Image (cartoon, rainbow, N blue to C red):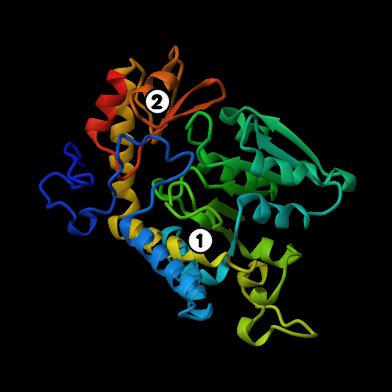
């Protein structure tokens, strides 16, 4: 994948192939933006869709029902990206909200195993179940699969770690969990959109959309396998969780959807208006192509710092005053767990990498 020139957007192409025309002008950051692991930049199609909806809202030109169509478009696209049926995908606003559904429904006394230092939104919902004697222990990410035993009921892990960018050995974790019948809950927030994942290998794959899926904040997805769908209580159920949402505004009894939609929360309309065109654009590029592009740029940066290559789009490094130096050069990055964190996505180029290394 080549991406060396900035012409409003990455010249994004596989060697020998034409640049993808649909990407022209989709992104135009004013300076190198290396902070997608915090939040992604919207493509033009998403930004314009959102602006149009906001203009219609301000002018009172439309009713709200069509905005819900964006939620369904995004749900279907997320399902395709992860190799699952749309009927098995629930939507919400945050990762912790969707993880909390599962945590609240596991049996009393369950034992949960998580990776050390994983992201709070994956971990905290389980700690709130201590009054039911639910216990959570941790193990180093590299030895998480080894820590899964007959007493393990639930395994939690981010597919890619937020602080370090390290990818989990998901195959080994899934195999070890299957052997003892443990439930697997994967937080794919730092991977979905650039890291191919076969969601059916796990009981749950949950993802916020505002990072690598380039959506406004307030969108999240949860694939729930059959085992979890049967035992999870739809404790947030409202009108949008009904079999016929638009006919379920008032009264009892409830008639919840037979699919994973029973776990939906009422969508934040404008967030989903921006989410649908963004995730559809990523799908049109192809996650495998995005992965190749992102990792190549990340490894170019790692090489410039004298680090070994990796398989991640996120680079964590120890460098004196690195964040301040980048900020002084107008380059957006982050500090996490005491170190510099930079992240590379579709709108980044080799020139961005070189500018960061120079800084």
> Would you say 342 lies left or right of 123 here?
left
Image location of residue 129, percent across then percent down? 82, 47
The quadrant in which the C terminus is found is top left
Q: Nearer the viewer, residue 249 or 17?
A: 249
Vertical comparison of 203 with 129: above or below: below
Can you give x and y, in whole percent of width and height, for residue 191 in the image? 46, 44
**Residue 283 image position (x, y, % from top left):** 34, 59
Name the residue furthest top: 320
How many callouts does the rendering have? 2
Crowding near the residue tagged with mark 2, few <14, some 14–19, many ≥20 C-alpha atoms within 10 Å: some
Q: Residue at x 21, y 42 (%)?
A: 1
Where disc 2 sits, the SS reads helix
User: Where does label 1 land, which residue?
Assistant: 271
User: In the rendered view, does 158 fall on the left or right side of 78?
Assistant: right
Q: CA distance from mark 1 to mark 2?
A: 28 Å
Q: Looking at the image, is 10 positioned above or below residue 107?
A: above
User: Which residue is the site of mark 2?
Assistant: 327
């Amino acid at each position: 994948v080549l991406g060396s020139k900035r012409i409003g957007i990455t010249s994004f192409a596989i060697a020998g192939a034409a640049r993808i025309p649909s990407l022209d002008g989709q992104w135009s950051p004013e300076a190198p933006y290396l902070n997608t692991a915090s939040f992604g930049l919207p493509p033009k199609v998403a930004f314009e869709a959102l602006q149009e909806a906001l203009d219609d809202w301000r002018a009172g030109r439309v009713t709200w029902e069509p905005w819900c169509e964006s939620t369904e478009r995004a749900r279907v696209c997320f399902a395709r990206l992860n190799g699952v049926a749309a009927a098995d995908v629930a939507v919400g606003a945050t990762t912790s909200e969707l993880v909390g559904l599962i945590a609240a429904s596991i049996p009393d006394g369950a034992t949960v195993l998580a990776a050390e230092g994983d992201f709070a939104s994956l971990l905290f919902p389980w700690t709130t179940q201590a009054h039911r004697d639910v216990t959570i222990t941790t193990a180093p990410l590299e030895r998480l699969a080894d820590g899964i035993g007959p007493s393990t009921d639930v395994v939690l892990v981010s597919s890619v770690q937020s602080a370090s960018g390290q990818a989990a050995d998901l195959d080994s974790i899934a195999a070890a969990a299957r052997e003892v019948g443990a439930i697997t809950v994967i937080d794919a927030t730092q991977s979905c959109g650039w890291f191919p994942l076969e969601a059916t290998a796990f009981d749950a794959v949950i993802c916020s959309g505002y990072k690598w899926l380039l959506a406004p904040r307030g969108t999240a997805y949860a694939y729930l396998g059959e085992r979890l769908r049967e035992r999870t209580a739809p404790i947030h159920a409202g009108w949008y969780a009904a079999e016929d949402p638009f006919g379920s505004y008032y009264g009892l009894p409830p008639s919840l959807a037979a699919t994973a939609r029973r776990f939906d929360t009422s969508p934040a309309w404008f967030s989903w208006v921006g989410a649908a065109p963004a995730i559809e654009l990523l799908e049109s590029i192809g996650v495998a192509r995005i992965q190749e592009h992102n990792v190549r740029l990340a490894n170019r940066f790692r090489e410039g710092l004298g680090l070994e290559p990796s398989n991640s789009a996120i680079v964590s490094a120890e460098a004196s005053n690195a964040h301040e130096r980048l900020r002084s050069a107008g380059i957006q990055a982050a500090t996490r767990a005491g170190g510099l964190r930079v992240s590379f996505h579709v709108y980044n180029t080799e020139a961005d990498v070189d500018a960061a290394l120079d800084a």
